[in-house]
Image (cartoon, grey):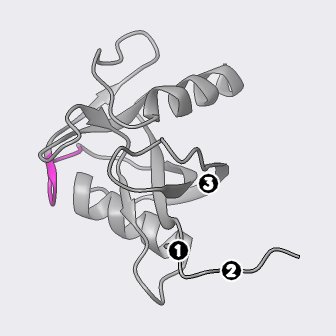
């Protein structure tokens, strides 16, 4: 039987695919790693994944989102170069115009055909999975 030692555990995070105006919202990150990314972040202690997703979407895009469903969980230890994270991805709907906030430098709506070249983390893989299942 394997016993636990005092190694660090992976950090729980959420990412949100925000559907709006026939596209999805990405944020341009202010901090490394550079690039565009899905809105998201770390789950606070005592916070549910759903609450974290709604909070992070609001903080980074200014949008009030309505969660539609949990999409998938991504756990590859190399998905974030800074830490070992496990991200639960949600699909959400919103209306309005995204505006960058918190640690986002910019927020824009993209579609499958005009995704930015530089996408941070494993978010290109997440988007490929999403578009494959969506269309």
Mark 2: few/some/many CA within 10 Å (<14, 14-19, 20+): few
Q: Position of residue 44 (x, y in %)?
A: 40, 80
Q: CA distance from mark 3 to mark 1?
A: 35 Å
- Of the two numbered discs 2 and 3 in the rendering, the one whose residue sits closer to the viewer: 2
Tag 3 near tag 1, CB within 8 Å: no
Q: Is residue 108 left or right of residue 42?
A: left
Corner quadrant of residue 133: top right
Q: Which residue corresponds to mark 2?
A: 4
Mark 3: few/some/many CA within 10 Å (<14, 14-19, 20+): few
Q: Is residue 133 above or below residue 121?
A: above
Q: In the image, what residue occupies the spot 23% across and 43% down?
A: 97
Q: CA distance from mark 1 to mark 2?
A: 8 Å
Q: Nearer the viewer, residue 76 or 47?
A: 76
Mark 1: few/some/many CA within 10 Å (<14, 14-19, 20+): few
Q: Is residue 29 left or right of residue 127?
A: left
Q: Is residue 33 left or right of residue 114?
A: left
Specify the label residue 7 is tagged with: 1
Is 35 inside the magenta-drawn segment?
A: no
Q: Which residue corresponds to mark 3?
A: 68
Callout 1: SS? loop
Q: In the image, what residue occupies the spot 49% across and 73% down?
A: 8
- Of the two numbered discs 3 and 1 in the rendering, the one whose residue sits closer to the viewer: 1
Q: Is residue 93 above or below residue 28?
A: below
Q: Is residue 43 above or below residue 134?
A: below
**Region in magenta:** 98-104
User: On the rendered image, what quadrant is the C terminus found in?
Assistant: top right
Q: CA distance from mark 2 to mark 3?
A: 36 Å
Q: Is residue 64 visible?
A: no
Q: Position of residue 129 (x, y in %)?
A: 63, 28
Callout 2: SS? loop
Q: Nearer the viewer, residue 31 or 58?
A: 31
Q: Is residue 59 above or below residue 44?
A: above
């Amino acid at each position: 039987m394997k016993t636990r030692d005092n190694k660090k555990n992976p950090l729980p995070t959420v990412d949100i695919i925000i559907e709006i105006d026939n596209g999805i919202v990405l944020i341009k990150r202010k901090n490394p790693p550079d690039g565009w990314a899905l809105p998201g972040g770390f789950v606070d202690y005592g916070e549910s994944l759903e609450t974290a997703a709604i909070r992070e979407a609001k903080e980074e895009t200014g949008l009030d989102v309505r969660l539609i469903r949990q999409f998938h969980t991504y756990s590859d230890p190399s998905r974030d170069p800074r830490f070992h994270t496990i991200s639960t991805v949600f699909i959400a709907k919103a209306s309005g115009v995204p505006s960058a906030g918190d640690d986002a430098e910019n927020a824009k709506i993209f579609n499958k055909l005009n995704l930015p070249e530089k996408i941070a983390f494993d978010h290109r893989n997440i988007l490929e999975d999403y578009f494959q299942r969506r269309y």
